[in-house]
Image (cartoon, rainbow, N blue to C red):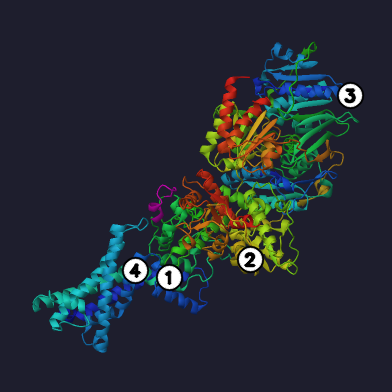
């Protein structure tokens, strides 16, 4: 049986936006787009796509679908997944589906995944690079009633119906197995995602995406309720006053620094 | 669960891979909250066998009840089994607030439990406060790779309010003289079929010399300006050895091959909150700050007085690390040999 | 006298001789056709038939005049002696062949006294050729330049050439003695040798044998030529004629990229006819490899061997050049005919090692274009095979997403202006110059200081200029040089659009890479502006007196100027920066031994600013040592990358106390009152 893998991706403001360009609108509780810097696929999601494509590399009849909920520009991240080598893309776009919390996002994704069924595994980033929560992957698994394996560096199908998954712990790698369908999330240990070749980029730009809105997806207003509220968004005040050590030579400054640290009881 | 009351701390135990120290940190945070909400504090411990002194010993840190759940299946960590056990315990205890550490267990169990209970959860909190008006929990957490902070509250009417807290950000609870409490050992029915995933093997990293980054109280870290793998070994590894700390590195230093990738601190590396973080020849990119910005004391050594790292540092030396560090480390060695 | 005038078993010798000559010509033609002409005719198009008068001049200077060959005096002299002698010899050779058929239908018989005068010239040329051969042998056996490989091929050819001359002199001496024309004014050398001639009967036989030997050598040479490096005899004149007439810095784009089926050069079938001709032309002299900074620092790249491997692949006989020369520098796959050209016969690490400095092309006496071929192959690696170093990929991704390759920068494009009153470029109707800061100038810590210095200098001299600030993006240069032609074209089109909208007319850049791209590569996308590098602007401001430097350099300052490849070799600007350095009050100026055309790259070109250098030896350390060796206290340059690389080198060598690295603008700004 050919495998069907679903990759959930999110579009986020570029996490490498320099601090100088990073601005927040506290009233609207959102980040203002930095000039000249395009939003990107959340890096961990890109790594999840990479793992799915590695499985496809080994089993070329595998079908990889990119799934995304987002606004107008989110099309770009679906296309990025296609350019990397995925087969199909689905974009859920609806004004009522913006500014969702983790529960709502997982709920909407669970409806979309049910549309895309049957599937063998779902691939997500360990957390999105905007709100860094790490909730949606596990939440989606809970709503679908499937097991979740998180913080992975690789996964492979060892026998039909079994996934072997390498989870990264602070002091080592744990190897897990689970029966499909299973949800997996990935971390930077996956390594650099593949660079799309030009032919795939061109082909991706011509592929039709499946577009769905809230009604088309069958979002139930009773179910679609936030479980948490973002009450404030702000740039933290750094109130450290740096004490620069002055001395006649760099070496003396170094020695003086050691004395200061001892004085401050830090060493 | 509208009548939910109390704060439940999900303790961790080394027996099943838990993080040492987090239980007391969570208790410290809970006690701070309890002064505002007036709640009592419960602690949940899981394991195959939880010795009485261990459970009992937490009472003096301010816990009213220690729920010691014992079952052979809890002897080692499994996400499904722990999630099911914790969720059932939370249903039974019905607390207003549940606190996890943002540990390996916390990352699995806190979200899964919150979804099962259809309540809200905030991950990786740096600070927890109580909203004076509603008396509800305000969870402060870093977002956008540490570039911004966000305050979260669980939606009105939903309980419990679940937070996972970044390790080493909370002051551990101190013992309170004369505090009393009890240890409860409820009967636990647990079916192995709950576990849908199983761990088949574990490969520990090659034991790094000295202290691990995650637990180190002192981190000596090098940036791209270090210039070579040899210099990194000499100054950063050498410095960490003298100070009894761990070696860290910026992404740029790892990318350039100066430092092993496992040493990377930052947004896409490890997040550390040591007592002292010495940043050598690094600019202080926000991606790096995301991994170490919560260190108690940051010290920067950089040639460029405009380097961003100085903006977050307590002490700084503007100068070439090649001249500063040897003198600094020599002095440290001298001071350390003199003792306190 | 001529053995071919006799009959052998009733068959006329002339007939046999004619058959041998025809057979030799046949083999020669067949080999030339299959190995060279056919591939060239099948090559992809590359229009090189314009500007014929200019091409003719190049031909005269560089082929007939041997101008480039003389860049190396000794080998230039020996080559010229052999080459000119060879040209002079051509009618004489024809005459020798004709003599084989009949003594009455020869050029000598036809021209009489004119021929005799010509013979005198041949005598002189022949001595020259022998001297040339002796010098060549001396060079190979005694001088032994490092990158001159002495295969049997070289000695064989030298032997054949010398043999031709020796047999000529001996035969001519015998002929003159037999004819009794002694001493012949037109053949002084042969006449002198005639004194050693034996008795007539022996002399006749000896003459016949020597003539036969001479013609035999000649025909062997002809047959051997297409298989040897001496093919350049045939190919080089064409390669010189069809050389690139534009400034070397510009690379040609892939036309209609979105309609292409294949990208760049991945196999022999993707090469243009000119690239085929390049390969056929290589003389294996090794001058390119001698000057290659990548080769000098143990990278797996030797430009000569890259071209030779292309040549072998074109002939369908993959060869071992890189594998033997670069042993230990990269892991080459075992050689087989099935290997693809790119990432097979030519290792991908070879292609990534190039810093595009152009030293190879500058050195090449026959105008082979190494760098464009390397970039064509990188295009294939990136756009088709996506085989590129991780660090290169990170830079490309950053350009795509953030419009600059400086991943991890903490700055945006306006933060350098803090505290300075920098005017915005509103429109070319109001402001004379667009000052194009560039990614490095805006986003890289060290380079921001240069940007601020440039602004200070421009303001001090009252130049009307403005900057685009947040509207600036990368020119695309690193993308093009790292093989992502698609990304380059997108960025180029976007910038051209913006500049048109802003009515840009004149641009000042502080980065020679931006300068080169605007000047030489944007015209293809409709961008035609007056581009100046800040060194040129400052030179002009100093000359016109608008800029006055008052504060002298600190006592005892010695400056050496390091040429940026993209300002110097790629765009021919060697003087403006030197004039600026010379105008600084106080201080002395010294040159590094490798300067101007022969300058040694800092190691950052071709995208290497953002790539990891893997070998123990580093290009920038090497160049820094060259600067240190001059005893200078300041190394001045006009390129942000050079500044970073040299500073890194100075740090690496622990020489911060000896040598400071400064951009010209910084030195000028410091000298302002």
Which comes sooner in the sequence, label 1 or label 4? 1
| Residue identifier under label 3 | B3
Observer-side mark, 1 or 2, equals: 2
Q: CA distance from mark 3 to mark 1?
A: 90 Å
| Residue identifier under label 2 | C541
| In this rendering, position of residue B318 left or right of residue C648 | right
Determine if marks 3 and 1 fall on one subunit.
no
- Residue C16: mark: none
| Residue identifier under label 1 | C38
For disc 2, the chain is: C
Quarter residue C337 falls in? bottom left
Determine if marks 2 and 4 fall on one subunit.
yes
Q: CA distance from mark 3 to mark 2?
A: 81 Å
Pointer 3 with pointer 2, Cβ within 8 A: no
Q: 10 Å neighbourhood of mark 2: few (<14), some, or many (≥20)?
A: some
Magenta segment: C321-333
Q: Is residue C557 above or below residue C207?
A: above
Give the secondary structure at mark 2. Answer: helix
Residue B45 in picture, x, y percent from top left: 73, 19
Observer-side mark, 1 or 4, equals: 4
Pointer 2 with pointer 4, Cβ within 8 A: no
Q: Residue at x 58, y 28 (%)?
A: B331
Q: CA distance from mark 2 to mark 4?
A: 44 Å
Determine if marks 1 and 2 fall on one subunit.
yes
Residue C668 in picture, x, y percent from top left: 61, 58
| Residue identifier under label 4 | C77
């Amino acid at each position: 049986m050919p495998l069907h893998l679903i990759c959930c991706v999110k579009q986020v403001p570029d996490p490498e936006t320099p601090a100088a360009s990073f601005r927040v609108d506290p009233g609207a509780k959102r980040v203002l787009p930095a000039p000249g810097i395009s939003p990107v696929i959340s890096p961990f999601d890109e790594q999840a796509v990479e793992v799915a494509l590695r499985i496809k590399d080994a089993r070329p009849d595998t079908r990889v679908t990119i799934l995304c909920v987002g606004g107008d520009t989110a099309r770009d991240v679906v296309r990025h997944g296609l350019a990397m080598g995925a087969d199909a893309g689905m974009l859920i776009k609806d004004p009522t589906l913006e500014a969702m919390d983790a529960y709502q996002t997982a709920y909407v994704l669970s409806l979309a995944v049910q549309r895309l069924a049957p599937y063998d595994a779902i691939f997500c980033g360990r957390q999105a690079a905007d709100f860094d929560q790490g909730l949606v992957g596990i939440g989606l698994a809970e709503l679908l009633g499937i097991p979740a394996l998180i913080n992975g560096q690789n996964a492979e199908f060892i026998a039909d119906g079994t996934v072997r998954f390498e989870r990264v712990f602070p002091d080592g790698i744990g190897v897990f197995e689970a029966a499909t369908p299973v949800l997996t999330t990935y971390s930077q240990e996956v390594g650099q995602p593949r660079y799309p070749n030009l032919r795939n980029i061109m082909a991706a730009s011509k592929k039709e995406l499946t577009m769905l809105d809230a009604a088309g997806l069958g979002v139930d207003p009773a179910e679609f309720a936030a479980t948490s509220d973002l009450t404030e968004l702000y740039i933290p005040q750094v109130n450290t006053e740096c004490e620069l050590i002055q001395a006649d030579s760099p070496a003396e400054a170094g020695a003086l620094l050691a004395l200061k640290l001892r004085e401050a009881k830090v060493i | 669960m509208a009548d939910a009351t109390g704060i439940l701390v999900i303790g961790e135990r080394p027996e099943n891979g838990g993080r040492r120290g987090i239980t007391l940190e969570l208790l410290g945070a809970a006690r701070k909250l309890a002064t505002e909400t007036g709640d009592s504090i419960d602690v949940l411990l899981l394991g195959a066998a939880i010795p009485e002194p261990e459970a009992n010993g937490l009472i003096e840190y301010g816990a009213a009840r220690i729920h010691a759940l014992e079952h052979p299946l809890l002897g080692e960590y499994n996400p499904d089994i722990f999630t099911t056990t914790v969720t059932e315990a939370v249903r039974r205890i019905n607390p207003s607030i549940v606190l996890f550490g943002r540990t390996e267990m916390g990352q699995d169990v806190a979200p899964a439990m919150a979804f099962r209970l259809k309540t809200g959860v905030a991950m990786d909190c740096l600070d927890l406060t109580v909203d004076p008006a509603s008396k509800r929990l305000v969870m402060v957490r870093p977002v956008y790779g540490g570039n911004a902070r966000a305050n979260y509250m669980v939606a009105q009417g939903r309980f419990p309010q679940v937070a996972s807290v970044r390790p080493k950000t909370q002051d551990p609870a101190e013992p309170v003289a004369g505090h009393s409490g009890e240890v409860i050992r409820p009967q636990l029915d647990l079916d192995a079929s709950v576990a849908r995933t199983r761990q088949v093997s574990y490969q520990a990293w090659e034991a790094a010399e000295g202290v691990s980054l995650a637990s180190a109280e002192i981190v000596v870290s090098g940036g791209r300006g270090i210039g070579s793998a040899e210099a990194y070994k000499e100054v950063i590894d050498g410095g960490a050895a003298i100070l009894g700390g761990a070696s860290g590195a910026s992404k740029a230093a790892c990318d350039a091959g100066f430092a092993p990738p496992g040493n990377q601190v930052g947004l896409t590396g490890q997040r550390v909150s040591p007592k002292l973080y010495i940043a050598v020849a690094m600019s202080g990119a926000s991606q790096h700050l995301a991994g170490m910005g919560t260190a108690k004391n940051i010290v920067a050594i950089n040639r460029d007085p405009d380097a961003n790292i100085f903006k977050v540092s307590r002490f700084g030396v503007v100068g070439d690390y090649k001249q500063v560090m040897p003198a600094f480390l020599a002095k440290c060695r001298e001071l350390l040999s003199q003792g306190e | 006298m001529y053995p071919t005038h006799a009959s052998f078993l009733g068959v006329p010798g002339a007939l046999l001789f004619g058959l041998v000559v025809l057979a030799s010509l046949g083999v020669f033609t067949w080999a030339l056709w299959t190995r060279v002409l056919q591939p060239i005719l099948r090559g992809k198009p590359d229009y090189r038939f314009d500007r014929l008068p200019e091409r003719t001049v190049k031909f005269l200077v560089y082929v007939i005049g041997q101008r480039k060959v003389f860049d190396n005096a000794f080998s230039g002299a020996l080559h010229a002696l052999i080459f000119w002698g060879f040209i002079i010899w051509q009618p004489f050779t024809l005459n020798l062949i004709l003599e084989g058929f009949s003594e009455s239908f020869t050029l000598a018989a036809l021209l009489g006294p004119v021929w005799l005068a010509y013979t005198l010239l041949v005598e002189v040329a022949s001595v020259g050729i022998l001297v040339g051969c002796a010098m060549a042998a001396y060079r190979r056996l005694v001088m032994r330049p490092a990158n001159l490989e002495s295969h049997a091929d070289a000695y064989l050819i030298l032997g054949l050439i010398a043999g031709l001359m020796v047999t000529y002199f001996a035969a001519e001496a015998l002929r003159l003695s037999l004819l009794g024309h002694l001493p012949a004014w037109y053949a002084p050398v042969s006449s002198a040798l005639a004194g050693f001639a034996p008795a007539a009967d022996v002399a006749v036989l000896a003459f016949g044998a020597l003539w036969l030997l001479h013609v035999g050598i000649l025909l062997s040479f002809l047959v051997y030529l297409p298989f040897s490096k001496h093919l350049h005899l045939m190919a080089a004149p064409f390669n010189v004629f069809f050389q690139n007439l534009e400034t070397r810095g510009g690379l040609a784009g892939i036309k209609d990229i979105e309609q292409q089926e294949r990208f760049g050069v991945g196999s022999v079938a993707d090469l243009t006819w000119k690239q085929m001709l390049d390969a056929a032309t290589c003389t294996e002299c090794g001058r390119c490899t001698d000057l290659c900074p990548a080769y000098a620092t143990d990278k797996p790249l030797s430009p000569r061997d890259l071209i030779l491997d292309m040549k072998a692949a074109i002939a369908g006989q993959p060869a071992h050049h890189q594998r033997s020369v670069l042993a230990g520098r990269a892991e080459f796959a075992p050689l087989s005919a099935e290997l693809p050209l790119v990432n097979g016969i030519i290792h991908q690490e070879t292609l990534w090692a190039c810093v595009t400095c152009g030293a190879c092309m500058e050195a090449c006496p026959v105008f082979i274009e190494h760098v464009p071929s390397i970039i064509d192959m990188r295009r294939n690696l990136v756009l088709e095979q996506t085989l590129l170093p991780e660090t290169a990929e990170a830079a490309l991704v950053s350009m795509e997403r953030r419009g600059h390759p400086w991943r991890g920068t903490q700055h945006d494009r306006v933060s350098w202006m803090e505290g300075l009153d920098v005017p915005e470029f509103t429109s070319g109707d109001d402001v004379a110059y667009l000052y194009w800061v560039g990614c490095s100038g805006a986003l890289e810590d060290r380079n921001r200081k240069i940007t601020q210095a440039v602004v200070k200098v421009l303001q001090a001299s009252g130049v009307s200029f403005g900057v685009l600030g947040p509207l600036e993006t990368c020119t695309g240069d690193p993308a093009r040089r790292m093989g992502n032609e698609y990304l380059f074209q997108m960025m180029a089109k976007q910038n051209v659009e913006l500049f048109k909208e802003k009515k840009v007319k004149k641009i000042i850049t502080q980065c020679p890479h931006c300068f080169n791209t605007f000047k030489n590569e944007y015209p293809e996308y409709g961008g035609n502006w007056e581009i100046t590098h800040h060194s040129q602007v400052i030179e002009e401001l100093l000359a016109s007196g608008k800029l006055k430097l008052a504060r002298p350099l600190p006592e005892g300052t010695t400056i050496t100027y390091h040429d940026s490849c993209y300002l110097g070799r790629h765009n021919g600007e060697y003087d403006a920066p030197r004039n600026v350095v010379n105008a600084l009050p106080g201080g002395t100026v010294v040159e590094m031994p490798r300067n101007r055309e022969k300058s040694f790259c800092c190691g950052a070109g071709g995208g290497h600013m953002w790539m990891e250098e893997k070998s123990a030896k580093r290009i920038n350390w090497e160049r820094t040592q060259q600067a240190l060796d001059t005893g200078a206290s300041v190394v001045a340059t006009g390129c942000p990358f050079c500044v970073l690389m040299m500073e890194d080198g100075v740090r690496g060598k622990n020489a911060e106390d000896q040598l400071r690295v400064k951009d010209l603008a910084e030195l000028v700004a410091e000298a302002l009152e």
